[in-house]
Amino acid sequence: MSTEQRLKMIIEAALLAAGKPLSLGDLLALFDVTDLPDRQAVRVALKALSEDYQGRGIEVLEVGSGFRIQVRSEFAPWISRLWAERPPRYSRALMETLALIVYRQPITRGEIEEVRGVSVSTNIIKTLQERDWVRVVGHRDVPGRPSLYATTKEFLDHFNLKSLSELPTLAEIRDLDSINRELDLELPGIAANVSTKEGEPDLHPNQESEECDKAADSVVTETETQHPSSHS
């Protein structure tokens, strides 16, 4: 067995066993100093592994936290039937709130309410934080010092994104169906083992109704096809 083949097999085994995405640093930490590969060799092995999976039901995907092996999204409707529980359904208000955080982060609760024109339920913020999609990244330097919310690497991982720059800009969000097909966010991949602020577009309050609605649909629309244990 060649050194390259052995490295690829070690990486494959690690990705299958980990139950979460692994960064290049995580993969390098698997090796002793005496047989430590360089980062480029690991990337070459990941690319070769990805090519091995072409035409198969699983794939190697790079997301915000690193690399993982997962079921291809087109097979999620069948694989999701392995689990009896129904996926959670999220309210329109929660989707709009998440969309505003995604597109205007960092943003305060008051700024979200200003754009939406209604108050934001404490349960909505709590749910987003419990899902590890949103976190507090600081406080606005105004009276009361309100919390500033932004998305997390877990948000990127769940939606199969490497960075926020992969999301469409608000100017591109016109036809909802075509956006959903482009992003394929309705059926994110399922982990095979069953186990920041980038490119930020600007959203102004005077765009609130139509743009917020479309952005909300393009970010989250009943995406919970994953088994709970497959989330990081």
Image (cartoon, rainbow, N blue to C red):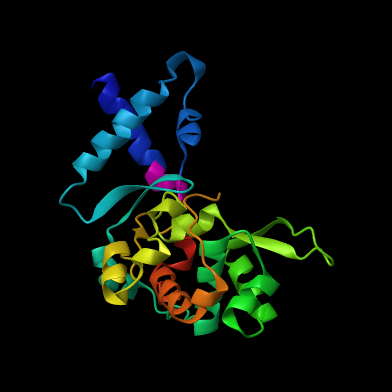
Residue 16 magenta: yes
State which region is magenta.
15-21
Q: Is residue 91 visible?
A: no
Instruction: Name, please, the residue furthest toward the left.
Output: 55
Residue at the image point whose x is 26% and y is 38% from the top: 49
Along the viewing direction, whichever of 95 and 82 lies nearer the viewer: 95
Instruction: List x then y, in percent, for residue 117.
Output: 61, 84
Instruction: List x then y, in percent, for residue 17.
Output: 42, 46
Residue at the image point whose x is 26% and y is 27% from the top: 5
Residue at the image point whose x is 56% and y is 62% from the top: 104
Query: In the image, is residue 114 above or below residue 26?
Result: below
Q: Picture quarter containing residue 151?
A: bottom right
Query: In the image, is residue 59 above or below residue 28?
Result: below
Instruction: List x then y, in percent, for residue 193.
Output: 38, 54
Q: Is residue 60 visible?
A: yes
Q: Picture quarter containing residue 36?
A: top left
Instruction: List x then y, in percent, for residue 29.
Output: 51, 29
Along the viewing direction, whichever of 224 and 102 lies nearer the viewer: 102
